[in-house]
Amino acid sequence: MVTSTSTQATRFRDLPPWPRAWLLLGCLAVVLQLLVMTGSVTAQSVLTQVGQAVVVPRYVGDSQYEKQNLAPLMQWCEDRQERTVEEARRSCDWRHTRQNSFHFGASKAVYWLSVRLHNGSSASRNVVVDFGVSHEDYLDWYVLDSASGNRLTQGRMGDRLPMQVRSLPTRHQGIPVQVPASRDVELYVRSASFDGWHQLLQPQLLSEKAYLEAEQKEDFANGLIFGGLGAIVIVAFSAYTATRQRSILLYGLALAGLLVYSMAKTSYDLMFLWPNAPGLHSRIVFIVGPLTILLYTALVFDLLKARSHLPRWLWNGLMLWCTLAAVSGLPAVFDHIQWAVYSTLVAAWLTLPVFLTVCWLAIRQVPGAWMMVIAVAAQVVAVLLNALRAMGLLRTVTFDQSVFQMAGLFQALVLAYAMARILIQMRQEKLKAAQQAHEAHTRLRAQEEHELRHDKLTGLPNRLALLEWLRQRMDQQRPFAVIHIGIFDFKAVNDQFGHAGGDYALLELSRRCQALLGPGDMMAKQLSDQFILVLHGMDTIQALSVASQLMQRLTQPIAYAESEIVLRPRMGLAAYPEDGKEAEILLQHAHIAKREAAHLVSHIQTYHSGSDKIFERRNLLLRDLRSAIAGEQFLMVYQPKLNLRTGQVDKAEALLRWDHPQLGRISPVEFIPLVERADASWQLSMWVLERGIAQMAKWRQRGYHIGLALNLSAQDLHHRQLPEQVRKLLESYEVPAAQLTLEITESGIMQNLDSVRLVLAALCELGVTLSIDDFGTGYSSLAMLKQLPVKELKIDRAFVAPLERSSSEQSDDAAIIRSIIGIGHSVGMRVVAEGVETLAVARLLESWQCEYVQGYWLKPPLAADQFIDWLAAGTGHYITELQPALP
């Protein structure tokens, strides 16, 4: 605590002299205001102290009629008995003051003022006794003959009277007096307050001409002030509509409040706006004044962002005080003017905690706070002067009329400067923001341009950038070679290691390729798993050497997540200008060579002119594939399966063929990869299922209960709706599920074992027989076979064909087949051998307990009707030949 006090004291001593003076002045203002509120000092007591309790007649000579301050020449008395003017003249305790004005403060008594006017000339004189723009409620005046005491004229004026009923219909409380020639008259003024709060009175004697000239000068000066304020208000609101800045709106509202308050304080509102509503006029000062101070306070806090710098308790306290200030004028609404005076004075002291708060912010070096100290100090001075006026210590009409107006104008000027700085800062911020936006837009365009021409994963140039680069090289007519690198079955890498593993493999591939690039070479990425290398100054022979090195590097395992990723790249080479003089054609030729590389052991191929025809044929088949499915260009042929145990043909395999209208019969070896590439496997498989099951139904109607095997692709097993589609087709054609066999390749099952297990189980529950096609070419083990709901193994023709050359049971091929048959039987599966071309091979397989055989020895694939005709006419012949070997 000691340290904190010392620090605060040090901070106060470190302040510049004028902030310390403002702080002390604010404290003095608080003391004075408290004295007023507690009644310790009253205006009446001050007047009594400085006045003299004697009655001395006061004369005003001819030379004094142009302009004369009457306060020192007038007498006053307090009347608590409601006397008439004659009674007051006779019995009132008349006194006089040495001050230049009268202020009776808070009192419900009536006060009388009197003065004797002398006209020594031979002509009558018309003069005006002007009490200024006083807000005294009622001023009744009487002109009496000095000699007889008779009333000559009388009238009434006051702030609560409409303009048209006043003695003079002007803002000033003026009394027209005619002084006869060579005579004396006495003027008596009765001052009465509606609610016990008397206003400052500073009477002056003027000629009619001087009175009119003084009022014209005031109107001109006030017109300039009000016109300027109105113009600034309009500009502020216009600026707000353009910028939507809250501080500008608060500034406009505060100036509008100051304008209305100033007009009410000088009675211009009663003169021009509502001349017949003096009650509204008397209330506006008490309502608008606190609201104007509140708006100025809100503006100061908004400019300083005070909420972010102040403790919560202090901010909440200030907000509570602001709320009280906002409602301080409510007593005036109900004509409780005295309470309205007290409440608005209390509300006006909102400026003091605001002033202290702003000083505290300035000490903490909040930007702009010292300027706000000057602005708020003007309000503190205004409140101090108002307290002095309320106590009668400051008895000047000028201050009474415009103390808050002057403070508000000064504050408006300071805040206008602050607003100008804000607008300039806003403009600078907008320019800076526009510049930043332009720079961001430029960076964004550059980034978009970069992303448009580069791959997001590897950062390598993409096909668009590659084509531009190739065209530039071709314009230079310098030779170069292109290597097109593609990864075979990259989808399997993503399936096994996830996309994160696939991305890691591509990044490592990119790194290994770039390690072999020389000056002037380039690497680009085309599709997700295809890369292009451009080797500057090389022909095909030199590029082959680089491709061989690349193949060695790229086939090395990639360590990932405690495992290894093995890529199987394919490379196609083309050289400029031999293999193409246009960028697109050169890349197309390299792509053709890459596709042909898949059939080579080295997996590297250079482009040759004959490759174009193969490429064009594949493109033609790809283009016509979907229309072929819908246009009935595909057909089914059926190859019989012989049951070696019964000697009967009770099953068949449905094989797919494509009759192309231009190219003729297309083999599955050629079009099945195209189907998978075009993502049409599911569509074609559904067509095969429906045609095959429909054909079994037709055979059943003719009395042939032949089981049928249909081939599915590995992609079909990823469709969870496959079992439901099979069930619907079997029910629709009324075919038993046991007659249907679905063949899936071994590699297709093993690569996606976890994802297809549920689909296989659902098919098995239907009663459908599942068969592993081409068994022996994949990676399945006995343990895996036991986990699968498979009932049939089909030995690939690659193992059966060698038996035609050597039918010895001691050959390696025979040992492999016997092992496969043994594996199938060990897990309860039947075994089918395909590709049987001779009777000798069939006898050998029968002796090894193979259940079924199929092949050209038995019969080539037949159309549906030919298959039935063959069964009816020639099956016995084949059975007879095999009969000796049957058990």
Image (cartoon, grey):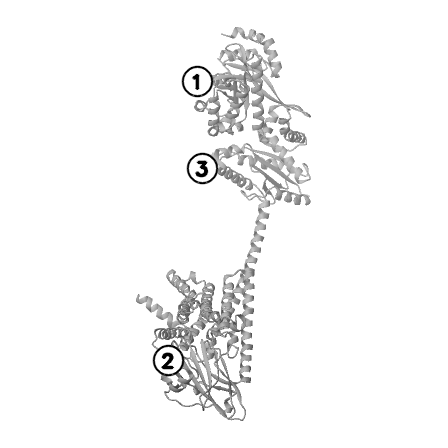
Neighbor class of circle 2 (other Cα within 10 Å; few <14, some 14-19, many 20+) is: few
Q: Position of residue 860 (x, y in %)?
A: 60, 15
Nearer the observer: mark 1 or 2; the answer is: 2
Q: Is mark 3 on a helix, strand or loop?
A: loop
Q: Could one spot residue 17 in this view of the protein?
A: no
**Quarter holding the N terminus?**
bottom left
Q: Residue 826 carries which label?
A: 1
What is the CA distance from the residue labelled 1 to the residue labelled 2?
134 Å
Which residue is at 53% across, 93% downward? 121
Q: Which mark is residue 81?
A: 2
Q: Which of marks 2 and 3 is nearer the N terminus?
A: 2
Q: Are marks 3 and 1 in contact (CB under 8 Å)?
A: no
Q: Which amino acid does label 2 sit on?
A: Gln
Q: Which amino acid does label 3 sit on?
A: Ala
Q: Where is residue 562 in the image (x, y as percent from the top left)?
A: 44, 36
Nearer the observer: mark 3 or 1; the answer is: 1
Q: Are marks 1 and 2 in contact (CB under 8 Å)?
A: no
Q: Which amino acid does label 1 sit on?
A: Ser
Q: Do the residues labelled 2 and 3 touch (CB within 8 Å)?
A: no
Q: Earlier in the sequence, mark 1 or mark 2?
A: 2
Q: Residue 561 carries which label?
A: 3
Q: Earlier in the sequence, mark 3 or mark 1?
A: 3
Q: Where is residue 445 in the image (x, y as percent from the top left)?
A: 59, 50
Q: Is mark 1 on a helix, strand or loop?
A: helix
Q: Where is residue 853 in the image (x, y as percent from the top left)?
A: 54, 14
